[in-house]
Image: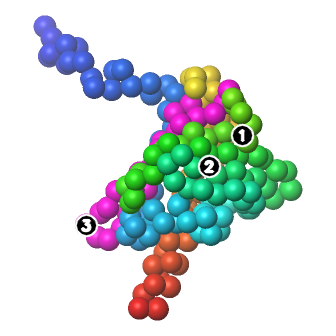
Amino acid sequence: MTDGAADIVSAWAEWPLDKEIVISRVVDADRETAFAAWTDPAQIVQWFGPDGFQIESHEADIRAGGVWRFDMIAPDGTRFSNRMDFLRVEAPSLIEADHGRDVDDDPDRFRLLVTFDKQDNGKTVVTLRQMHPTPARRAVVIGFGAVEFGAQTLGKLAVHVAGETGDAAARG
């Protein structure tokens, strides 16, 4: 006897879940404010990266076809070169980029998709999706803390946009 569940082919069956990392957070700001925090070169350097890290931006052209080259500087001074090549920037709903080290043909480069979903209460769900080149590379980045670092980054975004919303209300 069967309940029929084994006969159902999931829409996720062809999706490479073994290469993906997904991190999501609700932020207390409308999606235009959250989106602007990602696309305004003056804002993104204020909050991007894990706790304790600083950003030194070398070039920031955050639009489809543009590039953001930056160093992420750890609390101990270690510098990590980064480059995002933007594929799609659709205000205020999504950003898609290839993210890796600031070198050509980085074999560890991954696809990044950031979505901004409006909630009825004025808040926004920000979701980061990383699609790594292989399941093995995904395992490596999870092993060094990419999930925790991503959550910290979204936490810093949440603090930043809450301050931006408060500043706008105070000016307003």
- Please give the residue where the numbered disc 1 appears in the rendered image: 101
Quadrant in the rendering for residue 6: top left
- Write the residue at 40% across / 53% down: 90
Q: Earlier in the sequence, mark 1 or mark 2?
A: 2
Q: Which residues are magenta?
A: 107-132
In the rendered image, the quadrant that contains the N terminus is top left
Q: Earlier in the sequence, mark 2 or mark 3?
A: 2
- Write the residue at 41% across / 91% down: 172
Residue 50 screen position, x and y as percent: 66, 56
- Please give the residue where the numbered disc 2 appears in the rendered image: 67
**As shown in the figure, which amino acid type bears the numbered disc 3?**
Asp
Q: CA distance from mark 1 to mark 3?
A: 38 Å
Residue 5, above or below 146: above
Q: Which mark is residue 71?
A: none
Q: CA distance from mark 1 to mark 2?
A: 12 Å
Residue 64 showing in the rendered view:
yes
Q: Secondary structure at mark 2?
A: strand
Q: How is the image coloured?
A: rainbow
- Write the residue at 51% across / 53% down: 63
Q: Secondary structure at mark 1?
A: loop
Residue 68 magenta: no
**As shown in the figure, which amino acid type bears the numbered disc 2?**
Val
Q: Is residue 25 left or right of residue 156?
A: left
Our reading of the magenta stretch's main secondary structure is strand
Label 2 crowd bin: few (<14), some (14–19), many (20+), radius 10 Å? some
- Please give the residue where the numbered disc 3 appears in the rendered image: 120
